[in-house]
Image (cartoon, rainbow, N blue to C red):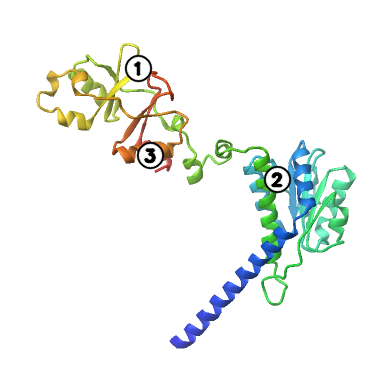
Amino acid sequence: MTSSTTDFLATGFLATGRRVIRREAEALAMLADHLGDSFAQAVEMILAAEGRVIVSGMGKSGHIARKIAATLASTGTPAQFVHPAEASHGDLGMVLKGDVALVLSNSGETPELADIIAHTRRFSIPMIGVAGREGSTLLRQADVAILLPPAPEACDQGIVPTTSTTMTLALGDALAIALMEHRAFTPEHFRVFHPGGKLGARLARVRDLMHDDLPLATADTPMSEALLTMTQKGFGVLGVVDESGHLRGVITDGDLRRHMDGLLSHRVAEVMTPNPRTIGPDQLAEKAVAVMNEKKITSLFVVAPGTDAAPLGLIHIHDCLRAGVA
């Protein structure tokens, strides 16, 4: 294959990619303009439910349904995907009174959905139907019917589920965010459902990573004793507290180097750096990393904000690295 042929093919592939993405973007714009009262009714129905949102769909719609269920569950709305074929063989027992069903089908006539639709009708389980065909069985049976706009699929043959699944996925995201905002879902709530991975690490609090076995000494402690405490704790830092236990200073490796001449003849007060930088226990660990980077230090004592209290803990840059924060 010649270079000119390769360049010609690459140009064609790029043109196809751009056409597909633009066509799907146009479909999403149509969906936003098309959204009406049925969307608000669906949100209200989910908010009123005592149970979970049961999301179901077949084929490509099933893949989208799984993602929507996962997004709902991770943003404060209990949800579960139920495969319609498995539902017909016993999994209908997962769909209970108090739940809300969210059923997806581009045609609205998917035969595998018949049993789950009938189950919701039989037991008066509210159902939200999402389909792309007006007057379809799914939309006629649904308590709330959301009709997707007639956007063409991204392929020129119009047979591959592309824009239709993109619109359905975006609709699911819109439902999840509307519910999330209504419930005032916070980053702290989000972290409860995302304790692992980079996202969980970014939302970790200082109190989650801090040590409470602290290296402390009073101002009149001889440096010979202070060095033993620093060595035993292994943080490379020593907190200096007054008679009431309030933090008044710190001694770091840098302070030791600056007072190397006659170090053991000094007392802690003569070596320490007063008024050290601290952080509150409920600050994000990312904030602690930012402070340590800015001040070129490796650890921070943790104290309650707005108080002259005793230190609660110590957070070290290595703790943040191990947790994936830095």
Place residue 34 in its image quadrant: bottom right
Q: Which residue is mark 2?
A: 80
Query: Does 88 sit left or right of 223 as displayed?
Result: right
Residue at the (55%, 41%) spot, across then down: 194
Q: Nearer the viewer, mark 3 or mark 2?
A: 3
Query: Does 52 sit left or right of 121 as displayed?
Result: left
- Label whose residue precedes the other's in the sequence (3 or 2): 2
Q: Which residue is mark 3?
A: 289
- Label whose residue precedes the other's in the sequence (2 or 1): 2
Q: What kind of residue is marked 1? A: His
Q: Could you say whether the residue bearing mark 1 is in a helix, strand or loop?
A: loop
Residue 300: image x %, image y %?
35, 31
Q: What kind of residue is marked 2? A: Gln
> Does any portion of residue 1 appear in the rendered image?
no
Please determine whether, in this image, residue 217 is positioned above or below residue 123. above
Please determine whether, in this image, residue 91 is positioned above or below residue 105. above
Q: Quadrant of the C terminus?
A: top left
Q: Which residue is mark 1?
A: 246
Query: What whole-number distance in Å separates the C-alpha atoms at marks 1 and 3?
Result: 24 Å
Is the Cβ of the residue at disc 1 closer than 8 Å to that at disc 3? no
Q: Label 3 neighbourhood size at 10 Å, few (<14), some (14-19), many (20+)?
A: many
